[in-house]
Image: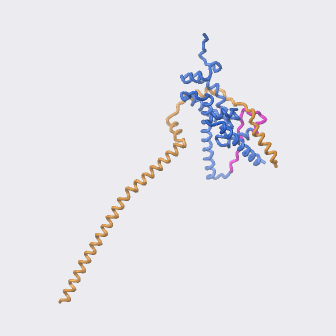
Amino acid sequence: MMSQENIQKKVDDALNSIEGIQRAAATPFFFTRLQARLQEKETIWEKISLLINRPAVAFATIAFVLVLNAFAFLKQQSQADPVQSISNAELNEQDINSAYDFASKTNYTLSKIWNQDEQQVKK
Amino acid sequence: MRNIAPELNSSVLDERILIDKLKQGDETAFKSIVEKWQDMVYNTALGIVQNAEDAEDIAQEAFVQVYQSIETFKGESKFSTWLYRITVTKALDHDRRKKRKKRFAIVKKIFGDSGEEEVQVPDFHHPGIILDEKENASVLFMAINQLPENQKIAFTLHKVEGLSYQEISDVMNSSVSSVESLMHRAKTNLKKSLESYYKKRE
């Protein structure tokens, strides 16, 4: 088992290993390859894929789609509500009418029966 | 009167003349600039991304940007400082992309069938390290790779490129004291990371 002292020595050796480092040289014909790269022209698809691959663009697109969805949902709801309320109102009106109708008919029928009863009693 | 040869010589023409010539679209001036600074750019990129092919790619990207946006260089800072900034930005972008891919691979692994734990192995050997120190330096570079971005940049520019704290503060657009603080934290983190590595290796 390595002692703490040995570990410390290893750490120091590793930290000192970089002292006196020489600068790494670029590979031969670097400029020739660079020239070839400069002459390459990016196609429109490469440009689009580079743009889409950017995280900022991707997140912005997702956020835009979400906002669009939320907007569409809210708009749909606000349009759906008046229709529902109108139809409810219509339904209520119908209910009231029919109820009133029933009541008036019932009143009419009852008064008719009472009249008939009264006539029979008089007889 | 002395005749200036058509082929530009970087030893005769200074930085400013080269840049002015490049602004006028002089291809020979661009060649001289590349030849003068290519090792600096490559070495900086290599220290950050720790991969020879990626470093070459980043160095090329950096010079493409120099060529395309030399008009924006106003000469307020040294050309080398501007070039370091471009290189560091490109290298960090590359590093971030690589780390994103790695994170995605880890997520895939979690949801996939393989449950093996990823073990980090020192696998980068900087060509500028002397043979005797290769193994130790490889472990150190692995630890450098785990540092937070700012600490990694400060440490790499100081130790790999040999820049002073003043020069690093120019590149990073910060004060000398904040570079000192970054270096101090980088060293502390490296010690912790290396201790942990050697303890695990027992």
In the rendering, what colour is chain A? Answer: orange
Residue placed at 52% from the left, 41% from the top?
Answer: A52
Q: Is A77 in the magenta? A: no
Q: Is B129 in the magenta? A: yes
Say if B133 sits above or below B36 in the image: below
Q: Position of residue B103 (x, y in %)?
A: 62, 47
Asked where in the image residue A53 lies, by quadrant, the reply is top right
Q: Is residue B57 visible?
A: no
Residue placed at 69% from the left, 31% from the top?
Answer: A24
For the colour blue, the matching chain is: B
Identify which residue, B146 or B186, lies in the foreground: B186
Specify the principal SS of the magenta part: loop
Asked where in the image residue B90 lies, by quadrant, the reply is top right
Q: Is residue B110 visible?
A: yes
Q: Position of residue B179 (x, y in %)?
A: 66, 38
Q: What range of the chain is rendered magenta?
A: B117-136
Residue placed at 30% from the left, 67% from the top?
Answer: A94
Q: Position of residue A62 (x, y in %)?
A: 50, 47
Say if B5 sits above or below B202 in the image: above
On the picture, is B163 further left or further right than A84? right
